[in-house]
Image (cartoon, rainbow, N blue to C red):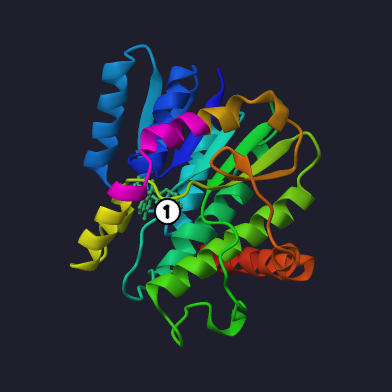
Amino acid sequence: MNNALITGGTDGIGKASAKELVKLGYNVIIIGNTEEKGKAAVDEIKQAMPEGHIQFWKADLSLISEVLRISKLFLSRFRHLDVLILCAFQMQPKLKITSEGFEKTFALYYLSRFALIQYLDSAIGIKGETRIIDFATPGQNYGEIDFSDITMEKNYSAMNALKRGSFCNDLMAVEYSKRASSGQVTFILVWPGTVRTGVINPYPQPLKSILKLYMWLFGTSPEEIGKISAYYVTDKSLANNRLKIFYRKKEIKLGTSRLDSNLAQKLWEKSLQLIHEAQTN
Ligand SMILES: NC(=O)c1ccc[n+]([C@@H]2O[C@H](COP(=O)([O-])OP(=O)(O)OC[C@H]3O[C@@H](n4cnc5c(N)ncnc54)[C@H](OP(=O)(O)O)[C@@H]3O)[C@@H](O)[C@H]2O)c1
């Protein structure tokens, strides 16, 4: 049986993707940070597909120690990872520093994704090609990454943190696709567009209601994006590609600044150092 791990699989795009993968016969593990949401998601999917294979693991993925715990748990139970869908995310209207000392958007939206891929490396590409599907917002206009202010204390705003996290995901995709062995993994970086999920819930009113209205008017349903996830997982034409970037089903390209290999390499090395420090502190 093929295994799929979905971070942020208890809600929104992640949950909709989980449903589709269970339908396709995958053994699906969903990760989220709220026990009740996880149980409810499993119940919902099991009710629709009683024979389906789905389980929930609770973890706060904004902590590298938790990413490591989940990775070890996965590796102790399964030999191969066939699909990894990265959806765990939470907007942070105010600057939050995790107990490991990272700005929370950077930690959850970028560093945990980087760390998960590192820690699960021995299960990637084992049974054939692994597909990594990274839901983010590619091509955001973000200037320089200030490596001397990773905690963003100088210029924090929710939007800056979101843009920096998106840029880091772009650079990770570029660097990872260079480093992975050919035919072993296809990295699919996705901008899903506006999707009607609870992603805007942490915003204060009246901004939250305005964003909600915008989502209802112009957004698409998470179910529709879940079906597109199934396409990323199954479409044969995507096989043996190191990197594919999509807006839904339309292929897009990153600007040349995104492909700056020096910066991508620098971020990669810095990230390795940060996760190493988080483990040893
Ligand atoms: N929705 C959009 O319009 C949109 C647009 C562009 C990009 N995207 C990207 O698509 C991805 C999915 O977004 P979405 O709209 O589906 O979000 P969502 O509905 O808010 O779902 C977020 C998921 O992340 C989990 N999560 C949050 N904090 C966590 C933590 N500390 N540890 C583990 N899991 C955590 C949530 O579970 P718990 O609440 O249980 O922790 C939930 O399952 C994100 O990467 C986002 O950047 C979305």
- Indicate if the residue with disc 1 has its beta carbon within 8 Å of ligand 1: yes
- Image quadrant of residue 32? top left
**Residue found at the very far left of the displayed protein:** 205
Q: Main secondary structure of the magenta part?
A: helix
Residue positioned 54% across, 27% down in the render: 3
Q: Characterize the local packing of mark 1: few (<14), some (14-19) or many (20 or more) Cα atoms within 10 angstroms.
A: many
Quadrant position of the N terminus in the picture = top right
Q: Nearer the viewer, residue 259 or 95?
A: 259
Say whether residue 245 is magenta: no
Q: Nearer the viewer, residue 139 or 35?
A: 139
Q: Amino acid at mark 1?
A: Leu
**Residue found at the very far right of the displayed protein:** 182
Where does the image place residue 198, in percent across and percent down from the top left?
Answer: 29, 50
**Would you place residue 14 above or below residue 119 in this image?**
above
Residue highlighted by disc 1: 61
Q: Which residues are magenta?
A: 216-228
Q: In the picture provided, is 261 more to the left or to the right than 115? A: right
Element at label 1:
loop
Q: In the picture provided, is 32 more to the left or to the right than 230? A: left
